Amino acid sequence: ETNEINLKGNVVLPKRFSQRIAPRAEAFSAIMNDEKRLVLPMSITGSIKKPIPMVDVSVLSKSFTRYYTTKALDKGLQKLQDKGKLPPATDETRKAIEGVLEGVFKKK
């Protein structure tokens, strides 16, 4: 029998707290669920007597990177459309670029 633990999961924060904290940074939308509640990826390691809870920073980093990359992509495509260098119907191009980005950010 071992006393070691190695758990991974998500902590869904209360709606009231999520609604208070979310307006402070638009990027928090990247870690919100459909109910507009912040979801923190967590792990608990250590032992049963001394558990060590930690926020999974790598998952948060990927979520925020994806958020800012998508935002920059949208802004860049909009600028090109405004300059007339891209036709208005560039959904296929955008989807192709998003597909590449998904491959880059996919969990290993």
Image: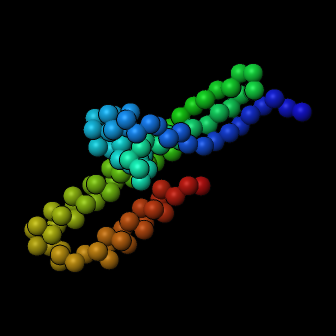
At 64% from the left edge and 26% from the top edge, which residue is drawn? 52
Visible residue check, residue 58: no
* Colour setting: rainbow
At 48% from the left edge and 56% from the top edge, which residue is drawn? 105
Indicate whether 106 appears above or below 30: below
Of 21 and 63, the residue lying toward us: 21
Q: Give the x, y percent position of residue 85.
A: 14, 73
Q: Give the x, y percent position of residue 29.
A: 35, 47
At 71% from the left edge and 28% from the top edge, which residue is drawn? 46
Q: Where does the N terminus fall, quadrant-wise?
A: top right
Visible residue check, residue 50: yes
Left or right for 28, reference 83? right
Q: Give the x, y percent position of residue 19.
A: 33, 38
Q: Give the x, y percent position of residue 76.
A: 22, 60
Q: Residue furthest left?
A: 83
Q: Residue furthest top?
A: 49
Of 64 and 35, the residue lying toward us: 35
Left or right for 75, reference 93? left
Residue 92 placement: quadrant: bottom left
